[in-house]
Image (tube, rainbow, N blue to C red):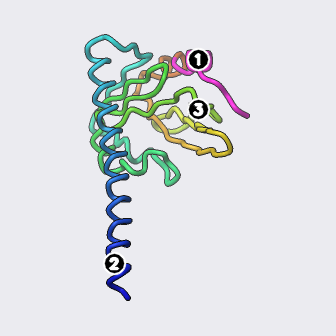
Amino acid sequence: MMSFYLPFIIGILLLIGISIYSLFWFTKKKTNSVRKKILSGDKTYLSHWTYDDSINFASFQGRASALSWYKKKLEHVKEVYICPDGVLIGDVIFYSWNRFAYFKDLKITNGNPACIFIKIEFSAGETETIAEFQIPIPPGKEQEAEEVLDTLYGIVRFCY
């Protein structure tokens, strides 16, 4: 009896594995494409921040962070590009706030260093997903961070 279910179970596990691998492959491909466009000047960005070794980008992401799958890679992030349509975090991920996204919260947090806190709701029909993460603000870039938020407030949609 077990031999009947074994190929079925292996098939399902294989499909799940392929799906997860495809998701990560697509994300990496999209990230590399956006990075090339930014570096070539074909894509505009609002701000480019670099971090020294004292900033561990991963340590700013909470347990509920949308970036928790990338926690190990985020430890080595040394630059961020904030664009009108998303944020490129090193060469790890381009996190997009596309046409299906609404900002639930967008603010500068108190802390050392301060961070831009982003909370996004992605809705499609009856389904909604909430994603949140933080972008540390490098020392001396606080005014630039406020300008970035002012610009984003005019671009993105808010859902309360």
How far is mark 2 from mark 3, CA to CA?
41 Å
Count of numbered circles in the view: 3
Disc 1/disc 2 C-alpha distance (Å) = 52 Å
Locate the N terminus and report the quarter of the image it occupies.
Answer: bottom left
Tell me the crowding category of disc 3: few under 14, some 14 to 19, or many 20 or more residues within 10 angstroms, Cα based: many
**Residue for badge 2:** 6
Q: Farthest bottom residue?
A: 1
Above/below status of 36 relative to 6: above
* Residue at image point 54% right, 36% down: 117
Mark 1, Cα crowd under 10 Å, few <14 / some 14-19 / many 20+, is few
Helix or strand or loop: what does disc 2 sit on? helix
Task: Residue 157: give x, y in percent of width and height.
Answer: 64, 24
Q: Residue at x 53, y 16 (%)?
A: 147
| Label 2 crowd bin: few (<14), some (14–19), many (20+), radius 10 Å | few
Label 3 – label 1 distance at C-alpha: 12 Å
Q: First in sequence: mark 1 or mark 2?
A: 2
Residue occupying image coordinates x 34% and y 31%:
30
Q: Position of residue 118 (x, y in %)?
A: 55, 35
State the residue at coordinates (49%, 50%).
62
Q: Which amino acid does label 3 sit on?
A: Ala
Tag in front: 2 or 3: 2
- Closer to the camera, 116 or 140? 116
